[in-house]
Image (cartoon, rainbow, N blue to C red):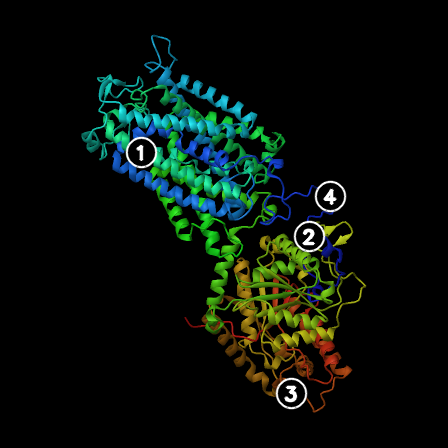
């Protein structure tokens, strides 16, 4: 495995010339210009924005439908469906008038709140094809939009099958055995498979209509709606005009429940009949093998018949003005159908006994003044509803394929489009409808249909609620009759009634939706493109994060809850991949910022493009971090900006990590064949993102400035870490190796070993970091090296006192570790206390510390001499040898970092060079090593 060459992880900048032409290209695109006008038409793309700077004739784009033909008629027809002539009697006869009115109020309340959400979203921007899928995906994002769109596609398929099943039921009851229009033996054969054959023929007929084009159906939908309305008014008049009869309403042939009764009673307008029909009289459903009917069954059938509120939204691709037509067309259709259903329910309760309505769902035909009115109404309402759902499902499937939600899986849909008509999508929908028709029972299909549509309505309300709660300034819908209260009521209503209808179907649909959400999040190739749509999750997270950041008070910080909040300063990501990856483990769920300094001025800034590259780098590394890039005239000034300004509120870095300043050539881990970070994503032809310093090139700043940065970091009260040899770090090898066993901690100040204290702030900070890494590498153990050093002033008496002091220090360290809940092995090192020459060489290093109390010099002359520097180098080489001899099985070493020379020293330049030279000798050829200097308390022994 590889890691960064440390001088490249120091905050070095890379200046690049700006691209002046990008400004002019931006203005050109703003006013409709195109760089490649011959290659790409200047047309607005779906999801590109809310504002279009060019108006186009809708008819030239295939948008030819107005509000009445494009929205009102499809919605009204879909909401009438099979319910109006076939199943209202079934509901009233079982549930009674009171419960029926309650169910209509609940259903239409849910629909009204959902319509308000649809209207709000649809009037907040340009709507393309795909209807509700388009609105949800562009609001909730790809994952929820794609999953809900997929389920809404299946809902339309099931709705089409349900309407066909109702149409077949009407045909069989009219022309089958015992049918109203049958004389003699010339009847259509009846039975399960004969009905399936009839349904398949109807399905094939509507397939042919869809292949001709949806516009043809939309233009004829006005005529179909007129026909259904005339038939419905004829039914109203018949209730008022037809008197009592006992031999007009026959028992259907398929009804095996009432074998002793051949005709059913009809009373006409009667107060007694109304009184009897007020309450519930739940019985058996003769179309479902005698299954008992209850509240949930009747509501499931009722709601399935009024789920057509999205029929207009599904035609959004053919509407001249979707933002205007969808709200007003949908609301007027909802009001029209609601009044129609209430009148019909009331007239049925006044004229027809509940026993009759329970045992013949098509009793409206015999009591009609002209029975063909009812037959025509059934066939036109069910066929048009089925056709509307089939068209809607094909348009949703086409939108899913255009957005590449499922990648190349649906490419055949795009290739199968002819003159704007998605033929392949229509054929796929037709095949799925055939599969649903195998279920057979209208009432069972109706419950599945209701649950699927309710889940779609729930998502629509959730989308509108979310965007309303975020307070996004760009959410300015033209439709004003909604609030977050209406969205919430609609959401809760749909969720509750889903489980009332059928808990198993509801749970299955929700689980399937969540599976689709997770799958699309992980595997969808359209994730990058979806970023252009905008996701409400980002707005909601921003809203919540801002709220909690304001609540996060830095004055209430406590050491018990301390965690590292890290600013890692890097030059080129190419040379520091292992270090970036390692620090991601070290952060312990804390803040992690990767900082970079660019040398230059604002004239050469390319913020937008470069920020995208940095985010791509984070994605490539799979680290949970932020990036901060600053522009300054010097590296030191830029680092000061980053340390002071990075983070927000109480989330500010408390630990600064830099690479080591040495003369090693940086390695390019993006191009290294054996590197786990290898990628070509950051190479575009001859242009290389994040360029690195090549071997032999001059460095961007000198060692003096590097040490000044270290001094600045400590002056700003930040913990400091210098990382070296991380090009040797191989996390995969450490995870599987049986040879690598330890994380080492050296709590001795190599620059002043006589003052070494394993319990000072720096040493405890090192132990804390070691324990954090132990949580990542659980199979390793922490070793703490106890180094006892004597002052040369006690050399003569040391032999008798040393053993007692060593025992005391070890016992004290063991007790401290126990109080800190740290499990570690303690290893004693004798070289500092037993080797007097070694100790004398160490005395020369005390003048390099920045602490005044450590500057105990042999004489008053504190000038650096070549002899002293050589003795210090010999000492560091010996210390390096001691560490290296014990690092054969070490994965990572933490070493005490002495404070750098003070900036106020007159010979700071010379001292800083010597300081870095000594650190270089100390860490040469070691395993991955972190030099640590802590300035804050990070451990606690109290509850």
Give the Cα distance between marks 2 and 4: 42 Å
Quadrant including the C terminus: bottom left
Q: Is 532 or 515 nearer to us in this picture?
A: 532
Which of the two marks, 3 or 1, is nearer to us in this view? Answer: 1
Residue at 58%, 34% in the rendered image: 410
Lower sequence index among marks 1 and 4: 4
SS state under label 2: loop
Lower sequence index among marks 1 and 2: 1
- Residue topped by disc 1: 343
Give the Cα distance between marks 2 and 3: 48 Å
Lower sequence index among marks 3 and 1: 1
SS state under label 4: loop
- Residue topped by disc 4: 37
Which of the two marks, 2 or 4, is nearer to us in this view? Answer: 4
Which of the two marks, 1 or 2, is nearer to us in this view? Answer: 1
Lower sequence index among marks 4 and 3: 4
The crowding category of the residue bearing disc 1, from other C-alpha atoms within 10 Å (few below 14, some 14 to 19, many at least 20), is few
Where is residue 931 shown, x and y percent of the image? 63, 70
Where is residue 169 shown, x and y percent of the image? 37, 22
SS state under label 3: loop
Badge 4 vs badge 3, beta-carbon distance below 8 Å: no
Badge 1 vs badge 2, beta-carbon distance below 8 Å: no
Left or right of 745 on screen, residue 273: left
Give the Cα distance between marks 1 and 2: 75 Å
Q: With respect to residue 771, does 508 lie above or below?
A: above
- Residue topped by disc 3: 856
């Amino acid at each position: 495995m590889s890691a960064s060459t440390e001088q490249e992880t120091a905050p070095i900048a890379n200046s690049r010339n700006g691209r002046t032409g990008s400004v002019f290209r931006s203005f050109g695109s703003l006013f409709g210009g195109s760089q490649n006008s011959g290659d790409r038409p200047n047309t607005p793309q779906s999801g590109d924005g809310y504002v279009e700077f060019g108006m186009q004739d809708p008819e030239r784009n295939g948008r030819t439908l107005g509000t009445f033909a494009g929205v009102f008629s499809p919605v009204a027809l879909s909401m009438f469906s099979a319910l109006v002539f076939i199943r209202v009697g079934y509901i009233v006869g079982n549930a009674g008038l009171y419960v029926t009115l309650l169910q209509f109020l609940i259903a239409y309340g849910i629909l009204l709140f959902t319509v308000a959400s649809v209207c709000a979203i649809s009037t907040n921007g340009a709507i393309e094809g795909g209807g509700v899928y388009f609105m949800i995906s562009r609001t909730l994002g790809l994952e929820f939009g794609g999953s809900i769109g997929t389920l809404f596609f299946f809902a339309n398929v099931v709705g089409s099958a349900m309407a066909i099943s109702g149409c077949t039921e009407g045909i069989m009851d009219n022309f089958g055995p015992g049918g109203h229009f049958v004389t003699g033996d010339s009847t259509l054969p009846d039975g399960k498979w004969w009905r399936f054959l009839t349904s398949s023929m109807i399905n094939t007929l509507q397939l042919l209509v869809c292949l001709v084009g949806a516009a043809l159906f939309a233009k004829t939908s006005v005529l179909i709606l007129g026909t259904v309305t005339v038939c419905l008014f004829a039914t109203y008049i018949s209730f008022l005009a037809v008197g009592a009869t006992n031999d007009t309403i026959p028992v259907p042939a398929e009804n095996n429940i009432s074998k002793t009764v051949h005709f059913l009673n009809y009373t006409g307008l009667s107060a007694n009949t109304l009184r009897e029909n007020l309450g519930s009289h739940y019985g058996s459903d003769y179309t479902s093998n005698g299954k008992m009917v209850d509240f949930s069954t009747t509501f499931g059938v009722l709601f399935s018949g009024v789920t057509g509120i999205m029929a207009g939204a599904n035609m959004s691709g053919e509407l001249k003005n979707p933002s205007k037509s969808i709200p007003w067309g949908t609301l007027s259709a909802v009001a029209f159908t609601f009044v129609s259903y209430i009148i019909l329910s009331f007239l049925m309760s006044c004229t027809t006994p509940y026993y009759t309505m329970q045992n013949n769902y098509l009793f409206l035909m015999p009591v009609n003044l002209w029975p063909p009115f009812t037959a025509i109404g059934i066939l036109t309402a069910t066929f048009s509803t089925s056709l509307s759902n089939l068209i809607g499902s094909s348009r949703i499937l086409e939108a899913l394929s255009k957005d590449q939600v499922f990648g190349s899986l649906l490419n055949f849909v795009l290739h199968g489009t002819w003159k704007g008509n998605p033929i392949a999508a229509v054929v796929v929908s037709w095949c799925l409808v055939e599969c649903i028709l195998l279920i057979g029972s209208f009432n069972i299909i109706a419950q599945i249909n209701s649950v699927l549509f309710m889940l779609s309505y729930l998502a629509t309300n959730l989308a509108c609620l979310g965007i309303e709660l975020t307070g996004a300034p760009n959410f300015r819908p033209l439709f004003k009759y909604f609030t977050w209260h209406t969205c919430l009521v609609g959401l809760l209503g749909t969720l509750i009634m889903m489980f009332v209808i059928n808990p198993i179907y509801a749970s299955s649909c929700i689980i399937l939706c969540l599976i689709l959400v997770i799958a699309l999040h992980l595997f969808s190739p359209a994730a990058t493109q979806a970023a252009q749509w905008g996701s409400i999750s980002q707005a909601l997270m921003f809203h919540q994060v801002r709220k909690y950041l304001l609540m996060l008070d830095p004055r209430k910080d406590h050491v018990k809850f301390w965690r590292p909040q890290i600013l890692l300063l890097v030059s080129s990501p190419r040379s520091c991949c292992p270090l970036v990856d390692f620090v991601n483990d070290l952060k312990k769920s804390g803040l992690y910022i990767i900082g970079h300094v660019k040398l230059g001025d604002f004239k050469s800034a390319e913020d937008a493009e470069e920020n995208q590259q940095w985010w791509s780098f984070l994605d490539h590394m799979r680290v949970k971090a932020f990036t901060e890039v600053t522009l300054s005239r010097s590296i030191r000034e830029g680092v000061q900006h980053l340390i002071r300004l990075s983070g927000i509120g109480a989330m500010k870095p408390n630990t600064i990590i830099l690479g080591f300043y040495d003369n090693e050539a940086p390695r390019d881990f993006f191009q290294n064949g054996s590197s786990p970070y290898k990628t070509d994503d950051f190479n575009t032809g001859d242009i290389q993102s994040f360029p690195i310093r090549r071997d032999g090139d001059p460095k961007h700043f000198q060692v003096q400035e590097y040490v000044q940065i270290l001094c600045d970091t400590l002056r700003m009260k930040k913990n400091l870490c210098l990382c070296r040899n991380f090009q040797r770090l191989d996390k995969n090898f450490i995870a599987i190796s049986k040879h690598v066993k330890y994380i080492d901690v050296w709590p001795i100040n190599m620059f002043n070993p006589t003052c070494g204290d394993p319990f000072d702030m720096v040493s405890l900070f090192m132990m804390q970091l070691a324990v954090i890494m132990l949580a990542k590498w659980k199979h390793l153990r922490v070793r703490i090296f106890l180094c006892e050093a004597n002052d040369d002033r006690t050399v003569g008496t040391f032999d008798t006192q040393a053993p007692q002091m060593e025992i005391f220090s070890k016992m004290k360290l063991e007790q401290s570790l126990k109080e800190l809940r740290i499990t570690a092995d303690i290893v004693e090192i004798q070289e500092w206390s037993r080797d007097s020459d070694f100790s004398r060489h160490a005395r020369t290093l005390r003048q390099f510390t920045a602490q005044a109390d450590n500057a105990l010099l042999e004489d008053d002359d504190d000038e650096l001499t070549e002899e002293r520097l050589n003795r210090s180098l010999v000492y560091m080489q010996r210390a390096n040898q001691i560490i290296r001899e014990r690092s054969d099985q070490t994965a990572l070493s933490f070493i005490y970092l002495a404070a750098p020379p003070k900036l106020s020293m007159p010979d700071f330049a010379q001292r800083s060079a010597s300081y870095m030279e000594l650190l270089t000798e100390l860490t040469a050829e070691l395993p991955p090593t972190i030099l640590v200097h802590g300035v804050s308390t990070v451990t606690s022994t109290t509850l």
